[in-house]
Image (tube, rainbow, N blue to C red):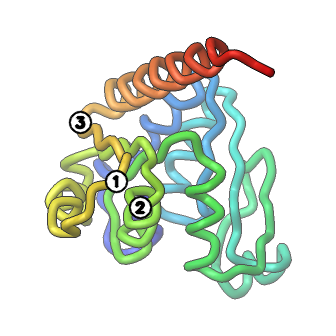
Amino acid sequence: MGSAGGVLTPEELDLARRLGRRIAERDCTIITGACPGLPHAAVLGAHEAGGISLGVSPALTREEHVDVYSSPLEPYTSIVFTGSGLMGRETHNIHSSDFVILVGGRSGTLGEFAIAYDEGKLIGILTNSGGMSNEFVHISKLTGKETDAVLITGDVPEKLIDTCLDTYVRTHMTTSAALNQIPRS
């Protein structure tokens, strides 16, 4: 999740592309809002590495996706047209993700962070990637709300993906193993 617009530097776009590439290298599927900007750069990186990408569009149709939202169709493996608008799409994105990675960020990314934080997701934050990226940890403290969210920060895309994935697998495997120990009646 990240900035779809605004001023994006070549360095920020490269960081997002590296995130996507690493997601594909780790055999994961990247899910984005099927929008331009940093999310699209991440999808391009995943595509370059032979990865699978799912776009969750706010539009109801392909035409609306392109004409109204000015969003790309390529190189996504698949795009789901939700018709739920920008804010509704954010909820679909978060619920469809095992963990969330934030890069850069403006108001839409802030909304995605808030949903992921409230839902207790594992959240990776690529710091020093522009936008609000360095503020999310502080924002979580300002909420005054404890959730089950786990925030992991880092400024190297590959290390951030590896740490988040390893944490997710370790947590998921521990939970799965514990569930398998529960006596069944």
- Of marks 1 and 3, which one's residue comes earlier in the chain? 1
Tell me the amino acid under the disc marked 2. Answer: Asp
Residue under label 1: 147
Badge 1 vs badge 2, beta-carbon distance below 8 Å: yes
Q: Residue furthest front?
A: 185
The local crowd at label 3, few if under 14, some if 14 to 19, many if 20 or more residues have their Cα within 10 Å, is some
- Of marks 3 and 2, which one's residue comes earlier in the chain? 2
> Looking at the image, is mark 3 or mark 2 nearer the viewer?
2
Tell me the amino acid under the disc marked 1. Answer: Thr
The local crowd at label 2, few if under 14, some if 14 to 19, many if 20 or more residues have their Cα within 10 Å, is some
Residue 47 in which image quadrant: top right
Tell me the amino acid under the disc marked 3. Answer: Gly
Q: Residue at x 77, y 80 (%)?
A: 83
Q: Which mark is residue 118?
A: 2
Task: Calculate the distance from the C-alpha at mark 3 to the C-alpha at mark 2.
Answer: 21 Å
Residue under label 3: 154
- Of marks 1 and 2, which one's residue comes earlier in the chain? 2
